[in-house]
Every structure is written in structure tokens, then in C-alpha cells.
Image (tube, grey):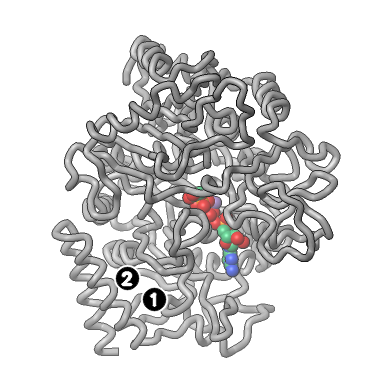
Amino acid sequence: MQSFSELEKWVDEVKNLCQPDSIHFVTGDKAEEKSFFEELVRDQKAIQLNPLLRPNSYAFFSDPSDVARVEKRTFIASNKKEDAGPTNNWIEPQKLKKIMTKLYKGSMKGRTMYVIPYVMGPIDAPISKIGIEITDSLYVVVNMIKMTRTGTQVLDKIKNETPFYIGLHSIGAPKKNGVIDSMWPCAKMQKKYIAHFPDEKLIWSYGSGYGGNALLGKKCLALRIASKIAYDEGWMAEHMLILKLTNPDLESKYILGAFPSACGKTNLSMLIPTIPGWKVETIGDDIAWIWMKEDGKLYAINPEKGFFGVAKGTSYRSNPNAMKAIEKNTIFTNVALTDDLDVWWEGIDKEKPKHLKDWQLHNYDISCTYPAAHPNSRFTVEATESPVLANEWEDPNGVLISAILIGGRRPSTIPLVHEALSWKHGVFMGSMMGSEITAATISDQIGMVRRDPFAMLPFIGYHVGDYLQHWIDMGQKANQEFLPKIYYVNWFRKNDDGQFMWPGFGENSRVLKWIFERVDQKASAKLTPIGYVPDRDSIDLSNLDVSEKDIEALTEIDVNLWFDEVKSIRAYYKTIGNKCPIDLVNELNQLEFRLKNY
Ligand code: GDP
Ligand code: PGA
Ligand code: MN
Ligand code: MN
């Protein structure tokens, strides 16, 4: 859409369709946010945490059906089925609109309809995108206020004819007269639809109130729709953290990392190095928009304004910076509650109290054997609460990219770190990336390894073959001298007892240091069939508590396992069909050839 009058017309249409009791345009100011939280507590949709322990913070508890993204109910409704590719669910767009229009009819009865003007990216960055989300969920509103730049200044942009993208969201639970609302109203699973119409750049979401399904700026606009816009316009929208790494000589580099949901992006983006003199600062923890400037170099911005992080496992030991960021002004979802109204989850520093309320607000004591917090429990907090936010985190010019990491949860085969032989080989590594499915999506296959190219499997808004070709093309267009190097990392190797062999978290700084020095051509490496791996004395392992045997295993290349891998990648490429880039098939053949000669 292009103009304010179009926006007014759309708001009117939605009002007539969804029949809310009232309409509220979100201004984004502090007083308004405060009154939203007061209303949420008054309506028993949220619990205010103990202000002495956790000032200005609130906890929400979802319906058990609504705890994560729902890939089965997520659709890329492109005009042609072929354009959605083999990795997306597709329904003919007119048919889907008919189904959803029926659902939207009267779906906001008894509720307020909020119109949220927001911008993904710093408001004046050339690459930023404006969105309007209509929603009937105040939970969504308060989360969008923390996660995106929201408010009246965005409407002024629209009045000056900046184009914008619209998204309609309803929890799909009209209020019935005389019936008391539940704490988290939403629709049944089979009525949830997270729909994208990439040809129109339109988003319709129905039936779920959960973050990735309902905060439309994040996964729906900044990844699925933006990936398609980026493909058409020649840039990239990626599921990546952005960090700034500074060495003891105070030289800095910017590094991106693509890991699937719940595989360590937020942690890596704010880690505290265990090696002296090194520093990590955060630019972004989930999404990077990447583009090439006239100098042929690649730059990135973080389109978001906050963190929607996994709570479970977060502690002052594993991620002190995240713990400091969530000491106040934070929204928690599906965590457990202590008797003095603070938050608790498995893996937090504090020992499990004798009594808790679990994430369903049921009484929970030592006799309970299930987890008290949901494995996908989350915190929402503004980036500015972080003690390690880089100064340039909202520089509209973006940051120059030196290296791109890819990775995921692979209990075997993939070593701790290996460097791609070339950009194309790096794209090959990204294409075959696999990871165990985590609780960040609702699935009956949690723990099983699946291919998740560049951690974008649930987020590519078009054909995966075109997506991979686009990666190759971007590298070809760039200035070859300044192409970022690509690294495959794996913090999740397990030993025979099922224990992680690598301590991870702050210790990952040892790998970051090696990468920094590789980029500067200062660290040595060993050439193997799969790429460059660190030489034993080129990676800093001083004062590290890992056995010799485990170090050996973490860096070894098991040729037989890699032959299995080659076979499985070949089968995977078949599923991509004839759009699978020929360059990647060549890379696979070359890998097989190198393995045979190893
Ligand atoms: P994100 O969803 O990709 O941002 O992942 P998070 O950084 O939120 O981490 C998800 C889960 O993985 C949390 O439970 C973390 O504690 C855990 N995790 C993160 N980094 C590491 C690591 O280096 N090693 C291990 N073993 N676990 C990690
Ligand atoms: P995550 O973000 O990648 O930090 O888990 C949420 C998601 O991808 O659902
Ligand atoms: Mn994510
Ligand atoms: Mn995260």
C-alpha cells in the first residue's frame, strides 16, 4: 500500500469484517504502554511480578495449544504453487482467503481492534520497511511495542507516501456475552492459519496469539515476506544474529550467525568471552537484513528493536548479559512463578523452590516430574536493556560483514568448526545444514535431525531452490576480495553417554577468536575434504576443561559418517527438484570425490 487514504480504507474494511467493539491506534508512548499493562492485569490476562524483585515486569500463560510457531498451519499462498516450492504449505490464495474471511467474520466481537504502525529497521535506514499490524490481542500490542519501533512517527512517514505492508491478526476468539474470557483465548489448532500472500506482500494470521505466529513484524514480515522482497530486489533477509567482536588490540569485526530456533543465536550474540581481552557486543539476536553497497561489500542491519529470547536454560552462568537485560521492564511467557511472584525456569541459577506455579499456573512441588516452565518459555525485552548493546546497533548504514556462521544441533559428524573453501562451498554448507528439531515449533518430531538451509526452512517465502541460487548470485555480484568467509560451527556434539562434549556459551569465544584471526589470515588451518579445520595450536584451548579425547573427537572427520552425509544430502537435493542449483550439486560431487581420496 502507498497512501494514508488506502490505510484508512483497509482499517474500515477490517472493522466491518471483524466487528470489534472499538478501535485504538497505537501511539507508542510510555503512558499508553503503562495503561495497556494495567488493563491486562485488571482483565486477568497477565500477572504483575513482584516490583521489588522484577520491576515493571509481567507474566503471561498461554493456552496449551499455543506455545510455539505452528509450521503445519503456516502457509505461503503464492499465486502459483510452484513458487512456494517443496518446503512450504500451499493453498490457492483465493481459496485460502475465502476460508479465512469466514473465520475473520465477527472474530473481534467484544474486543478492541488495535492498529499498530511500526517500522522494521531504524526509521531512516534506506532498507527499513514500514508495516501496519491490526490485532485484537493486547499481548501482541505490548510485545510489538518492545520488539519494533512503533508509533505515530510511522504514520507521518505513511502520510508522506512511504509504502507499507499490511498484516491482519486475530486470536479468533470473539467474546460472548456473559461468558468470562479465559486467560489466553485463541482458536483450536485446525482453525489456526498463519498465511502469507507473497505476490501481494500481504499477511493474514488467525487463531494463535504466540510470538512468531502473531507478532507479524518478526517472522511474517521481516523474514517470510521480506525474503521474497529481497529476492526480487537483490538483497537478503536472513535468520541471523549480528555480533561485534573486538580483540585485545581493540580491532573489531562484525560476524553473523544462522542457527535454527533455540540453537544459540541469542546466547552467542551477547556472550562473555572466557579468553582474556576479547569482547562481544550485540547488534541483533534473530534477524539480519543484508545488502550490498556500491563498494561491492556486504552490510547488515538488525530490523528489530528487542529480544524475544528462550527463557529456559538462561542463567547468570550461561548468559549473564541476558539475565541482566531481563531484571526489569520485561514480559515473560510460559515461565513458572515462585510464591513471592518472581520467575523460575529449568536451568536458572536458583535451585528449584519447594513450591511453584507451573506455566499453566497449577501448583507444582517436588513430587512433580515434568518441567515447571515450558521448554519454549520466552522473555521479551527492549534491546536497550542489554548491558552489551553495541553503539552502532541502529546505525542506518549497517555494519560491514566479515564472517558468516551457520550451525545447529548435530550430535555427531559435524566438527566444532570448519571453514568453507569458497563462497559457493559455503552456500553448499548452508544448504545442507541440519539440526535437531526444538521446542520452538510445535512438532511430534522434536529431537529428530532435519535439513534446515541457513536456518531458514520455516521462513523462506518462496522456492528453496531459488533461495539457494540467490545466495550464490549474491556472492558472484560482490567484490570477491571482501566476501565474508563462511564457517560451520557445532556446539552440540554429544559423547556416547549423550553428554555435550563442548562446554559452549562463553567458551564459544575460542572459536570466534580463531575465526577473527582466520579473516585476518593470521591463524593456521588444516585442509580436509570438508573444509579448513583449526590446527591444534591455532585454536586457543588454554585453561579449558575438556578432555584430550573429547578435543580429538570434536575436530576429527569421520569419513564413513561423511559418506552417509553425502548420501543423505543427495536425497535431500532430490526433494528440491530441478530448481536445485547445479553449483551445489557440483559442490556435493566434489566433496564426495575429496572424501574418496582422503
Ligand atoms: P536462539 O533461539 O537461536 O536464539 O537460541 P538461544 O540462544 O535462546 O538458546 C536456545 C537454547 O540453547 C537455550 O536453552 C540455551 O541455553 C541453549 N544454548 C545456547 N548456546 C549454547 C551452547 O553453546 N551450548 C549448549 N550446550 N547449549 C546452548
Ligand atoms: P529464536 O526466535 O530463533 O530466538 O528461537 C523465535 C523463533 O524462531 O521462533
Ligand atoms: Mn528465530
Ligand atoms: Mn533467540
Residue placed furthest toward the top: 5
> SS of the residue at dot 1?
strand
Q: Residue 106: x percent and y percent?
A: 43, 21
Q: Which mark is residue 44?
A: none
Q: Residue 254: x percent and y percent?
A: 49, 53
Judge from the rendering whether residue 272 lies leftward or rightward of residue 558; answer left or right. right
Between 428 and 69, the one nearer to me in the picture: 69
The residue positioned 26% from the left and 37% from the top of the image is 233
Q: Residues within 10 Å of mark 1 (few under 14, many from 20)?
A: some
Between 33 and 322, the one nearer to me in the picture: 33
Q: CA distance from mark 1 to mark 2?
A: 7 Å
Q: Residues within 10 Å of mark 2 (few under 14, many from 20)?
A: some
Q: Quadrant of the N terminus?
A: top left
Residue at numbered disc 2: 421
Residue 84 vertical position relative to residue 2 in the rendered view, above or below = below
Instruction: Identify the mark nearer the N-term, 1 or 2.
Output: 2
Q: Residue 578: x percent and y percent?
A: 14, 59
> SS of the residue at dot 2?
loop
The answer to whether the residues at label 1 and label 2 have Cβ atoms under 8 Å apart is: yes
Judge from the rendering whether residue 52 lies leftward or rightward of residue 454; answer left or right. right
**Three-letter amino acid code at disc 1?**
Tyr
Residue 343 vertical position relative to residue 160 in the rendered view, above or below = below
The residue positioned 47% from the left and 64% from the top of the image is 446
Residue 582: quarter of image? bottom left
**Three-letter amino acid code at disc 2?**
Leu
Residue at numbered disc 1: 532
